[in-house]
Image (cartoon, rainbow, N blue to C red):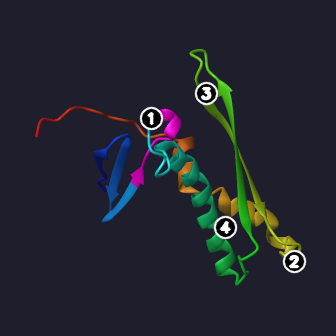
Amino acid sequence: MELIVTFPGGKKVNAELGGMVIPTDQPVESGGEGTAPSPYDYFLASIGTCAGFYVLAFCQQRGIATENISLRQAMEFTPTADGRKKLSRVQMEIVVPSDFPEKYRNALVKSAELCSVKRALADPPDFAIRTVVA
């Protein structure tokens, strides 16, 4: 799998993957135009949407309607020694309607925990970055 990153102008950075373009931009207060989520916003969203996919699949396999199910994700940050903020906790709640089967509530949490993004964070990859002359 390969991802190509291009620079369309300003603070915008695009990722091209599988024939799709994923646009990013920086907020206006960071010098961007605010026309797309920032790369970090996509990172945070990937956690919730990945867990959401597993919740969706769980419900679909059991014929459970998902129209009234949602995930709520809150992030906590702690300051670092150099004054930056570090993501220290991700709290996720799966909001289900009152008629959601009680017997599936714990299993629904277990399914969300299967998220491959969460697992990649728990066992991070090695990074190798270098310059190549074209």
Q: Is residue 20 above or below residue 27?
A: below
Picture coordinates of residue 129, whole percent (x, y): 30, 33
N-term mark: 3 or 2: 3
Q: Is residue 105 left or right of residue 49?
A: right
In whole angstroms, how far apart are the C-alphas of marks 4 and 2?
16 Å
Q: Give the residue at mark 1.
A: 31
Q: Which mark is residue 85?
A: 3
Q: Quadrant of residue 12?
A: top left
N-term mark: 4 or 2: 4
Asked whether 28 or 53 is in front, the reply is 28
Q: Give the residue at mark 4.
A: 55
Picture coordinates of residue 50, whole percent (x, y): 57, 59
Give the secondary structure at mark 2.
loop
Q: Give the residue at mark 2.
A: 99
In whole angstroms, how far apart are the C-alphas of marks 1 and 4?
37 Å
Q: Is residue 59 left or right of residue 38?
A: right
Point 84% across, 75% down: residue: 101
